[in-house]
Amino acid sequence: MASHAAFGPPGDGRAEGLFLARVAAGALGAAAALAPEPRAIAGAAALIVTAAWILPPGPARAAVVTGLLVATLALAAFLRWRGIGGDAKELGPETTVPFFLGAQFLLRSPLILSPMDARTLVALFALPAAGAIATSLLARRFGVRALIAGLVAASLEPGFNVAVVLALVALAAGMWLAEASHPLWQRGVALAVLVAPLAWDWRSGLIAALCGAALSAHETRGRLGPSVSIGLGVTGLAAALAMAPPQTFASMSALLTLGAAIVPSLVVALIGLRPLAIAAALLAGAAAHAIGGSVALVAPLALASLVIPREGSRIDWAGVVARWQLAWSSALLVLTAALATYPWLRHDALAQAVAELGLVHHPEIPLLFLVAALALSRSRAASRIVAWSPLLLAASVFLIPNLGAPRDLTTGEGGIVLLDAAHPQWAAEVEPGATAATLRLESTLLNAATLPAGSVVAAIQVEFADGSHRDLSVRSGEHTGEWAAERPDLKALGATAPPAWVSWIASDPAPFFGQSYRAQWSLPTSAPVRALELVRDASLPAAVDLQIYAVELRP
Amino acid sequence: MTAIALLLAGALASWFCSLHLPLPPADPLRDTLVMLPFLAASFSALHSWGLSLGARAIPRRLRVAETAALLGLALLTLARPGLEVLAPEVLAGAFALLLLHRLARQTLALRPLLGSTLPARPSPIFLALPFLAYLAILPYSAGQHPPDGDEPYYLLITHSLAYDGDAELTNNYRDGSWKAFSPRALEPQPGDPHGPSGEIYSRHNELLPMFLVPFYRVAGKTGAQLAMALLTAAVAWLLLRLARRWYANLPGEALFAYALVAFSPPLLLYSYQIWVEVPATLLGLFALDRVLAPQEPGSTGWSTKRWLGVGLPVILLPLLKIRFVILAAPLLVLAWLFAGRPRRPVLVLTGVLVLVAGGMMLYNATHFGNPLKIHTWDEVEFYHQNPARHLLGFLGLFWDAGFGLFACAPIWLLVLPALVLLARERHPLVLALAITTLPYLILVAPRSEWYGGWSPPFRYGLVLLPFLGLSLVPLLAARRHFGARALLGALGALTLVLTLLWLVVPGWTYNFADGRTYLLDAMSAHFHADVARIFPSGVRPRLAMWLWPLLTLPLVPWFWSLGRHRRARFARGGATLGIAGLLALVCALPAIAQHFASRSIEFEDPWVIKSGGHLEPERWRVDRTLFRGGWMLRGGESLRVPVVPGGTRLEVDVDLEWVRNQPSSIALEARQNGRLLATWTPPRAGTWETAALGPFAFEAGHDLEFLAVGAAAEQPLGGLLLDRARLHWR
């Protein structure tokens, strides 16, 4: 891939090719180290190279290459999992380190575009390696549940940052501390590690330390252990309620996202009145109340993962739940990785993944499957149904009304329309009888770095067949933004932009992520749309252009 | 019962999808998605059928993973219009990959059905599996590439036979019958025979269209394509049956060869297309199977079964295409050699063959005024051709980058060590192969259209493919050592990605006979380097055309034998290393292209940067290979060539023609970095000249430029037609 890029013409294509080559080197190297028989990975590499060589540079090629990389890493992990017979106690660092390293290359691929200084190298290599070692330590005691904890932690941010790694490390330290057979000095070191997160960020660090301490108390042999762990949870929640004003999640979807990650299994654990599950729930509540955001929830959710009922426990459906959660968490991580990596680069990849699966609109779907599975889990046939539930879940996505072909109205050169001072207007007729529930606009602004956020850049008028019309405003920073907002000099100017819909690598001269944006408006479906007009705002500076990639009407 | 229920449910779901799928009819993946439930149900039913026959089960995890992947891809296909960045070709490639995975797994699962000795009659499941595979690729591939080459003409004859009851096409061209199966207007092919009253007939024979008529009447073009898919599947099934005659104790290896023939190019590419080569292959296999069948106990002469089995193909082959006489006659020689040296049957069948061929020639002579219909005796008199032309055509059939077997599916390079092994063992297959193929190749190789014309690769060689497949069986018996694994890994991976590419972009299998291919053109344009010169071309002979055979003939067999006597541990990483080696070679490709000194320039090639002008003659010119293709440069236009220097002084010979359509003068200038190197004025118009430019000093790092200096040409167009340049470095 690097050869194709380096010997090819200079420009954006070369920069993107070299970037993809680096991402591929990390992900494929990790996959090769992970897979017990690297033949399959070599075959996948041949496919990825073909895609990189054949497809024209740009987001389309990047989406295919990174999608294949995600699939290859998932395949390698699956082969390794099968190779160790599904025995999570065998999840040593030789397994977790390559897996987490490969995941980091995909989940935090923008790091690869940064200068390769010590900070980047630590973020790319040291953090996932530390998280992997912590997960391996936890796996000795908790088996598959430790792996679920690792998957959940990797999905939340996404990728491994310091807070995520410290949360996993605190849990591992808590477990180490509880083991009486360890020498005193080791337990002393474990205690120091347990409280270390406080030095990074005291609020999220405190939650992580409390989670580690609750785990330690629970695992300590003695009658008081479980009570102490619940006590720590109660203390954490009480302190949060007393000391901090309530934080709210940005949206309901964020809460549902986190719920989708682990809560169904946590509910099962809570039904079984497991002390650690109660402590995890209390600490999750404390984190949600006092801190907000997904990073604070890493430690409580990872802790919650460790209390998923085990196979062979008194409740015979417990193993089924663990398998379901493993499959579900893996699927979420795969989807998160696909969305977090170039060219999508979603900062809220997990939320997007859940939203793409339709769970925001249909949160009842996973619960429905879980309940059905649990209700039937006493039979062998039922366990098969549960094993198939992620698949059935995928099938249920067909219910989403978002699928299918939108009506794209743009017919400019290459499908792109440019509204500038000389050509400020664009209009399109819609075929008779076409109703639309949603209007989507994919666009970017050119030379708009200094435009204040919220400025109206264009007006949209939608005309309906009954003569009525609807006026909409396209605002900078909300519906669209400067295409080069991520370029360091424009970033320094304070160029504001909404989250990107698709990114691409531009080299001007150093590579950075160019961005296009997608906005969406609801339309009344009572009357068919007759025509649509877009007019660039006359008050805009003359140099500012609006580039439109797509204007879509969706049924 | 379960299988039938599954099929019914699948068909019902497909019907439902055809009505309610939220994709526009023009979406290239719509038909694939509509067929998906039926195909998934069919594969599932086939799996159940296999289990009931005693086949292994495909591991449940894999089936679940496949189903999940299928659902995921279906979802992506539905979401694609909204995502905008996913090209349909990418999703088609993913579907094809999934299909190939299923085929590989299912083939492996069917292994127990062959037992320890190949059965006399393999289960029909071995027919159903390739048929399903061809059915699966049909909706997308056929949608992407409508009938092309000879195909629409066969369909037009079929249409005429089906609806007019004759093979006379005058009315069909007039009323546009082709609209039933082709989006492109169909005109008679140049040189098509005419009847005594000027009626238009086709140059193609009517046997294949006659076979297709009932299918065409039922389901139109799709019916004909399905019938062809069935014939192609029968080729694969018969191969397995024929393998028993020589390799009864190698069932696993025979299954490998069966899968290779059935599921890899070129047969896969022809599977649903309408070419006579597929039924000819089937007839050849059928006859050979009967020839090699053991004598029935108690009988002295030929049984009726054998008479029919050998006789029918021998009669039908010339009726398919007169060219196949040269395939039918050797079958009689094989019958003499391998079926008990029977005097009477061979003499009778030879007489019948002579009668059929003679009758056809007589009919052609009386009706069309030419016993060979549209061909000339020159084409048959191969002995008049230059031996170099024989060699070029023969090597081109296998090594040519655009039309050769090895370029379209490199795994067939395994034929080289396989033939070495057979020759060493003095296996009778070598004799059969020589008798069947050599006369045919001797006739085909020196033809101007040795490559098969406008068709997918290896068209004329397709009839040999089962023999080549069979030759692999003994070779594959020892495939676990390092060299074998490495070659299988490297060539298998390359074949896999090329197969995906051919399935996804079927138009790329139809190359122009100009020494280029779509793939090499794309690379040359990307790297601004003459990548094509590294690969062999029989159409545009170059050093690589001779080097590749010279290198691969000894090297591939040698590499295959590597590590044969080492421990198994040594062999373990063979496949991975093979793929890694392949990737390293691919990685080196641009470096090689940009390193070795340029010796020639074909001006129409994509690595030459053009400021204007046009291709001459244009691409779709009939019999374009008979013309010297070139780039027409009008006054004021230029070409920039990123040549790789091979010295400091350069002399260039440019083959060109001055096309003078109006009174004006023109000159050719060679420049580099703005510096004038040489000027040449054509002495006369209308003839090919060689302009000798230089010698002059050449600065590395700058492109060589060719400019046409003169008045800018208006209509009618004229200028300097540049064909090629030869570069001499000092």
Image: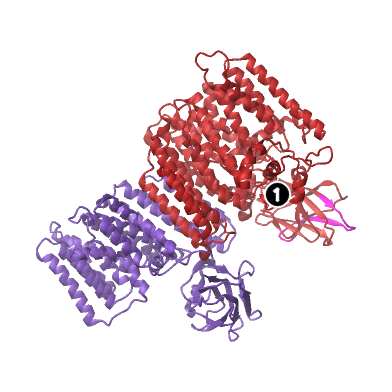
Q: Nearer the viewer, residue A386 or B644?
A: A386
Q: Quadrant of residue B274?
A: top right
Residue B662 on the magenta segment:
yes
At horizontal 25% and vertical 69% (from top left) the residue drawn is A208
In the image, farthest residue toward the bottom: A539
Task: Name the residue nearer the viewer: A203 or A516.
Answer: A516
Colour of chain A in the rendered structure image: purple
* Residue that numbered label 1 is attached to: B178
Q: Colour of chain B?
A: red
Residue B260 on the magenta span: no
Image location of residue A361, percent across then percent down: 39, 69
The image position of residue A69, as x and y in percent, is: 44, 55
In the shown orientation, is residue B580 left or right of residue A316? right
Q: Report the magenta residues as a range.
A: B657-674
B133 above or below A452?
Answer: above
Q: How many marks?
A: 1
Residue B367 vs residue A257: left or right? right
Residue placed at 31% from the left, 55% from the top?
Answer: A386
Q: Secondary structure at mark 1?
A: helix
Q: Which three-letter amino acid code belongs to the residue tagged 1?
A: Trp
**Image location of residue A370, percent across then percent down:** 30, 61
